[in-house]
Amino acid sequence: MLHRILDACSKALLFAAMLTVLPANAASQYPNQTIKLVVGFPPGGGGDLYGRLIAESISKSLGTSVVVENKPGAGGNIAAADVAKSRPDGYTLLLAMSGNIAVAPVVRKDLPYKAPDDFELIGAAVEAPHGLFVGKNSRFKTAREFFDYAEKNEVTVGSTSPGGAAHMGLEMLKLKTKANILYVPYRGSGPAITDLMGGQTEAFFATAPPLVGQTRNGALRLLALTGEERNPSLPDVPTFKELGIPVVVTQWYGLAAPKGTPKAIVDTLAQHLSKALADPKTIKIIRQDGALEKDLSTDAFTAYVKQDIEGYRNNIDPAALKSLSH
């Protein structure tokens, strides 16, 4: 009887040891197959450019194919939910971003995942400021003119994706100024720009890089940006901060993996992401339209995300958050 008990205990200990060794072996052999990067935008839309840039750069560095899988919908939340329930083996990654990791847990009660708890945050990659845009024929030549007018009159300001990162940036602006801003929601920037140019709205608040081309060709005027400092690609555009408006918030992108992904794999990916962000060619592509490379380590990125979540939670009118939560 004692022999049987000892034999059973030995087998149990051996099985436990095998469970410990298997992930370590898998991590030491990583990567040995194609890596999938899930992006919450359609091809060519939003952060898809950055997702493909990151995938290509990491693929070259790792010597392994990294393919983009587009899963658009719900502001990137569908992609995040898909990755959260994926096998934590390092072969399914998420293009994490402000919308599905920092904003979503603040505005969505029915979120099918917990952010950031359901993920291993690998590292930050790109940061893009939001901007306040007006049409070329607008009465407003400067941000100061806009806010002086808006303190005495209601102004209509369009923004996309109710509850998304840009909309929440606009809500911060409303809270931190005396401006009488009426938010006009749009499903995409195309209709918003059409209405702006046609005079149906006074301004458009959006993540800046996709619209920088229209600013440079004179179709739009960019009054101010939400970055901490002036953008090196747009040195003539002031920040809201320097205008005395304490709104510093950006749209960021990074890499995340399902919770439980071995640390050795996370560290490997973080190392190669950092290497990619140091490549002058990558930097040039990121900066060409006003975005910036943002190389944060795993720990620094995790702290940054938690701080960003609190920033949204504490700097938006509770009534606005309540109207969005469901």
Image (cartoon, helix red, strand yellow):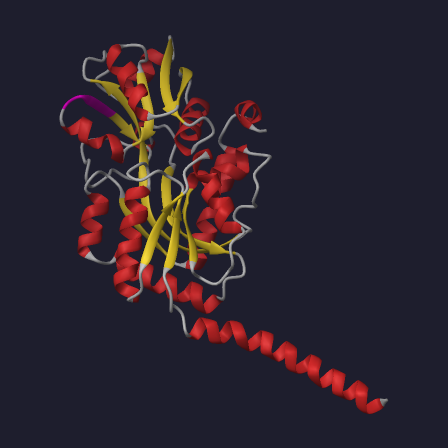
Please say if 213 is above or below 221.
Answer: below
Q: Which residue lies furthest to the left in this view?
A: 217
| Drawn side of residue 177 relative to residue 126, left or right | right
Whether residue 250 is visible here, answered yes or no, is yes
Query: Going 41% across and 74% down the picture, which residue do you hit?
Result: 29
Q: Is residue 308 visible?
A: no
| Residue plotted at (27% across, 55% down) | 56
Magenta-colored segment: predominant secondary structure: strand
Residue 115 falls left or right of residue 150: right
Of 224 and 258, which appears nearest the observer? Answer: 258
311, above or below 145, in the image: below
In this view, the residue farthest toward the right is 1
Horizontal and vertical percent position of residue 190 = 29, 23
Dividing the picture into quadrants, the one containing residue 276 is bottom left
In the rendered structure, the answer to whether residue 314 lies left or right of residue 142 reads right
**Screen quadrant of the C terminus:** top right
Q: Where is residue 54 in the image (x, y as percent from the top left)?
A: 30, 52
Residue 221 inside the magenta-drawn segment: yes
User: Residue 156 colored magenta?
Assistant: no
Quadrant containing the N terminus in the rendered view: bottom right
The magenta region covers 218-222
**Residue at (24% x, 15% y) in the render:** 197
Q: State whether residue 189 is above or below residue 43.
A: above
Instruction: Residue 79: name its quadrant.
Output: top left
> Residue 76, relative to residue 319: is it above or below?
below
Pinpoint residue 23: horizontal percent, then vertical percent. Answer: 52, 71
- Residue at 27% x, 45% y: name it: 292
List x then y, in percent, for residue 164: 44, 32
